[in-house]
Amino acid sequence: MLNGERFMAASGSVFRIPVDTHHTIRADLERPVELIEVRLGESLVNAFYKPES
């Protein structure tokens, strides 16, 4: 789901998720899922790390 809209994924599917887009993935328990996530831009560490003052 991207911003409340449902999309079906199949082998080879590619989704581009813009910054600040609400998203989730759900898997069918009968079939295995392999997800590869690639992030571009600032490091995730920078988003959550707050240096001590």
Image: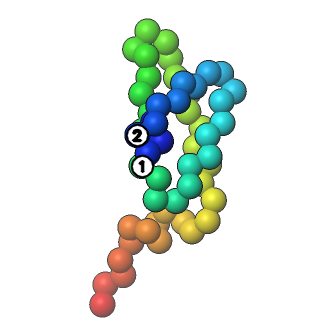
For the C terminus, the quadrant is: bottom left
Q: Position of residue 44 (x, y in %)?
A: 49, 62
Residue under the image location 40 percent in, 14 percent down:
29
Q: Earlier in the sequence, mark 2 or mark 1?
A: 2
Report how far apart the C-alphas of labels 2 and 1 lie in the structure: 8 Å
- The residue labelled by disc 1 is 22
Q: Give how far across and how far down residue 16 sits, in percent.
A: 62, 46
Q: Is residue 20 left or right of residue 52?
A: right
Q: Is residue 25 visible?
A: yes
Q: Residue furthest front?
A: 5
- Residue pictured at 56% horizontal, 55% vertical: 18
Residue for point 62% across, 21% down: 10
Secondary element at tag 2: loop
Above or below: residue 28 compared with residue 40:
above
Mark identifier at residue 47: none
Q: Nearer the viewer, residue 9 or 46?
A: 9
Report x, y in % for residue 27: 44, 23
Q: Which residue lies under the disc numbered 2?
A: 4
| Residue sitting at x 47%, y 42% | 2
Asked if one can make out residue 23 in the rendered structure from this viewpoint, the answer is: no
The crowd level at tag 1 (other Cα within 10 Å; few <14, some 14-19, many 20+) is: few
Q: Is residue 35 above or below residue 2?
A: above
Classify mark 1: helix, strand or loop.
loop
> Which mark is in front, 2 or 1?
2
Kind of residue indicated by mark 1: His
State the residue lying farthest toward the top: 30
Q: Contact, CB < 8 Å: mark 2 with mark 1?
A: yes
